[in-house]
Image: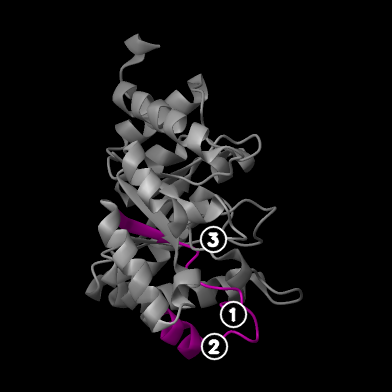
Amino acid sequence: MRLGCCGSMISPTADPIGIEIVEDLAAMGFDYIELSLADMAALSEGQFRAMAQRVRQSGIRCEACNNFFPPRVRLTGADAKLTVALDYATAAMDRAAELRAKIIVFGSSGAKNVPAGFDHGDAWKQIVELLKNLGPLAAARGITLAIEPLNRKESNIVNLAAEGLELVQQVDHPNVQLLIDYYHLIMEQEDLAIIGGAGAGIRHVHFAQVEGRIFPTQSSDHFAEFFDRLHQAGYSDRCSIEAHTRDFYSDAPRALRVLKELINGAGDVSQR
């Protein structure tokens, strides 16, 4: 399993894209960085070129992007316009593809949250229609969209991994699949058995210690069970730390060691 870090949560005010830690991640031994696509999409062409060059020179790649849609691009409700969303997504995915990203995370609570008074079922249909249109566009760029269920404190639609899996099944496109986020899974008190139910539909993983949503600098039996479940489901792609920290230079290498130990021990109960 390849291990990365979401840069945008390290210093979100000063560096919303997350690029400032790319050289540090490479030096620490991370395999890739995950950057905020909505913030990259807002860059001028010159700014984007400079950022892309910095990634190329860092020694690691931007293999995944989170924060797909900005809140200004409405995806549900009376103000949602499919053509506007697709125009934005096409330009944003072009930039992700230029970085050779393979995964774009579709959480985007600010864009997809259902407005007050709007029918929840109609909002769900809007998301399905959007993703049905996005699937072929992503495929043409060698990208998979990973639906990220978000807990109810952050979003009012697609909260459970089970709901994310239902959405994947309704969209029915090979380039629209599921993200499993440990933090959101536990916040929603969802059974880890959903990992086995999702199986090959899992395309990306986010991880953080739930209390404080911080870097996982110490292991636990529940962490081990989570990675055991991923191992049993046959998942071996990428796992990004998506977490806050007050001491990145101490917490990041410690968390990397913890995740490597968990992954290496997955499926081997004799190590616990």
Residue 135, quarter of the rendered image: bottom left
- Point out the image quarter for the C terminus: top left
The answer to whether residue 216 of the structure is visible from this angle is yes
Q: In which quarter of the view is residue 104 placed?
A: bottom left
Q: Is residue 174 left or right of residue 161?
A: left
Say which residue appears at 39% left-offset and 45% top-offset.
24
**Residue in the image at 60% along x and 36% along y:** 210
Residue 20 in the image, given as x and y percentages of width and height: 46, 56
- At 53% from the left and 36% from the top, the residue drawn is 215
Dot 2 or dot 3: first in sequence order is 3
Q: Position of residue 197 (x, y in %)?
A: 39, 42
Tell me the residue that label 1 is attached to.
74
- How far apart are labels 2 and 1 at the CA level? 7 Å
- Which kind of residue does numbered mark 1 sit on? Arg
Q: Which residue is mark 2?
A: 81
Front residue (pair 163, 24)? 24
Which segment is the magenta one?
61-89
Between label 2 and label 3, give the one nearer the viewer.
3
Instruction: Label 3: state its secondary structure.
Output: loop
